[in-house]
Amino acid sequence: MEIDFPFSISQFAFFQRDELEAAKLEDYFETNKPVCHYCILCKQRITINPNFANFDENEIELEFFIQNKSDLLHERIKIKHAYTGLKSVQIVSEFPYRQFKLIDENEDALIDISKATYVLERPEFYQQVINKDYLDYEILYIGKSFPSNDNLPALSRIASHSTYQEILEHYNLAHPDKEIFLLLFSFKQDILVDMPEELSREDAKKLAKYFETLYMIPKSKSYNESILLFEVALINYFKPIYNCHFNKNAPAKSHRSFKNTSEMSVKNISILFGLDNFYPRLYTSKNERNGEYYIHFKW
């Protein structure tokens, strides 16, 4: 009997360092699909030009700067509005111009946009961007956290993780034109079992129920093995520069961390790695930019 494990991302959320304290995971994730994995990412730093704002009766035009080492790439986007008799548009922003708001002649807020780094990747603006490659996220590190009653990993724990601190202190200093992000995600898991022909329908149902109990219940030992399998497959494929373990070689199937998996004769792990309704792409130095990755990991 051969067993395949297909994985895919269920839900996800992005956070920057200054967003961690106020973030609430329960706003993004279901309790039956807890956060089990995260990526530390980097992207080019994006700021708004506080001195540029054009408008007419239909649209407001803004300009953003994408930093690429010592160069600034200029991107202008047009935002539709429904204000009648608009007389003035002003950008309110302080150095380093990462956050901003738009106000009219009465100092009333016009559009609910606050962070420059997220604006250009929004679906309604992304197609206007000329330098789309500079909106993509590089994966620097892939990590896991086993779920518990409070839907871990808690953001504060990730923020204090030694690798996260190392990236902030060393990588960020060496690349001042980039910013660091956290991508948290939960996963969906199916089980494909090649049943022996002689197995009765009743026994097949019992076996399927057994798998469901064994591998689909968060906080069970076997569910934790699935979390580790997902992490191993991702690291082995993407080879992020800050991952040491599993980067070149996967752990032996006889490793004690995979006791249940080895007993169940798992042969293949497949992952559809992509983010729904998200336009920028993910990549590493070993992998080209792509919106979706089909990862096959033979055990």
Image (tube, rainbow, N blue to C red):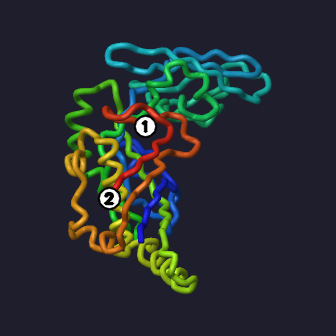
- In the image shown, does 235 or 265 lie closer to the viewer? 265
> Earlier along the polypeptide chain: callout 2 or callout 1?
1
Q: Is residue 212 left or right of residue 231?
A: right
Please tell me the numbered disc located at residue 266. Answer: none
The residue pinned by badge 1 equals 282
- In the image shown, does 143 or 60 lie closer to the viewer? 143
Q: Residues within 10 Å of mark 1 (few under 14, many from 20)?
A: many
The residue located at (78%, 22%) in the rendering is 85
Q: Is residue 171 left or right of residue 297?
A: left
Q: Position of residue 19 (x, y in %)?
A: 41, 45
Please tell me the numbered disc located at residue 299. Answer: 2
Q: Residues within 10 Å of mark 2 (few under 14, many from 20)?
A: some
Note whether residue 29 is visible. Answer: yes
Note whether residue 94 is visible. Answer: no
User: What residue type is disc 1 on?
Assistant: Leu
Instruction: Judge whether 50 appears above or below 171 on screen.
Output: above
Q: Position of residue 188 (x, y in %)?
A: 49, 60
The residue located at (20%, 34%) in the rendering is 170
Quarter the N terminus occupies: bottom left
SS category of the residue bearing label 2: loop
